[in-house]
Image: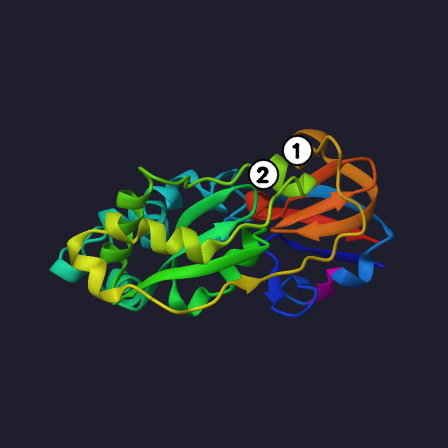
Amino acid sequence: MIYTGVLTKMQTEFLDPIQYYLVFKTDFVHMNQLLDKTMHLKHLGYECLSCGLNKEIYRQGFCKDCFFDKPVAGDWIMRPELSTAHLDQEDRDLAYEKKVQLQPHIVYLANSSNVKVGVTRKSQVPTRWIDQGAHEAVEIVEVPNRYLAGIAEVALKDHVADKTNWRKMLKNDIKDLDLTEWRDKLKPFLPEETQAYFIQNNKETELHFPVNQYPEKPKSLNLKKDIEFSGKLVGIKGQYLIFEDDTVFNVRANEGLVVDLSI
């Protein structure tokens, strides 16, 4: 069977284990059902997730023009502390920025390769943790806008990592840690404006991924360069497909690529 479509990040269900779906315009593929099957990927072209044109993808699934023009790719997406909608100040499109920035946000600790701090909209819990390949996570604060979450994250980055080591995450080279202890230890470092939003008594969330075999030496597939790849799917973690030969493919990092997927 052959499926053709534009890659976007896999949709997920928070079950045990996590369920993954690759969604195309006219089809979707339940990826868990492909475990231990051989699949073939072929790069056919591009389709910008904003303008829909066959233009080379620059970042985050967007062509270069859209990346530097559209509000969905504003700097505040990656750097929440740059949010200004709460001040009624526009970056690229104030109506869009208010819609996204002026809603409850969570600052959290997640453990995927190490303990890291992160920010997400409350509506994206636990999806954000799944996408990062975290096997455990806990909320620290819930604030009413993205700016407050951003300044809290910046303050905590001085005391804990804010990046995931993707190789360690995929190799499952991890330790179980008490994130509630970390949460309480980091509380004094939160900015004064966010202290009142501290979450005191919540428990860790545990996540289990559908992986039959972890890679010993993960090597990343560059579908733009290699064009085609065939391999036996043995696991899915974060937004990565894991193959028997230790090849890994980051679906989210390849958003906007038009592909054939055959099974």
> Does any portion of residue 91 appear in the rendered image?
yes
* Residue at (78% x, 38% y) in the render: 229
N-terminal-most mark, 2 or 1: 2
Residue type at tag 2: Trp
* Residue at (56% x, 52% y) in the render: 134
Label disc, if present, on residue 222 of the rendered structure: 1
Q: Quadrant of residue 175?
A: top right
* Residue at (23% x, 52% y) in the render: 83
Question: Horizontal placement of 247 versus 133: left or right?
Answer: right
Looking at the rendered image, the quarter that the N terminus falls into is bottom right
Q: Position of residue 28 (x, y in %)?
A: 69, 66
In the picture shown, does residue 206 fall above or below 158?
below
Which residue is labeled 2 in the image? 166
Q: Position of residue 212 (x, y in %)?
A: 81, 51
> Would you call the spot at circle 1 few (<14 residues within 10 Å), some (14-19), or many (20 or more)?
some
Query: Residue 97 in magenta?
Result: no
Question: Horizontal placement of 241 versus 137: left or right?
Answer: right
Nearer the viewer's eye, disc 2 or disc 1?
A: 2
* Residue at (39% x, 46% y) in the render: 66
Looking at the rendered image, the quarter that the C terminus falls into is bottom right
Q: Nearer the viewer, residue 162 or 64?
A: 162
Q: Nearer the viewer, residue 60 or 235?
A: 235
Q: Secondary structure at mark 1?
A: loop
Give yes or no for contact between labels 2 and 1 (Cβ–Cβ under 8 Å): no
Q: For the magenta stretch, what is the residue range? A: 27-31
Residue type at tag 1: Asn
In the picture shown, does residue 202 fall above or below 251?
below
Q: Quadrant of residue 225?
A: top right
Give the spatial CA distance, label 2 vs label 1: 16 Å
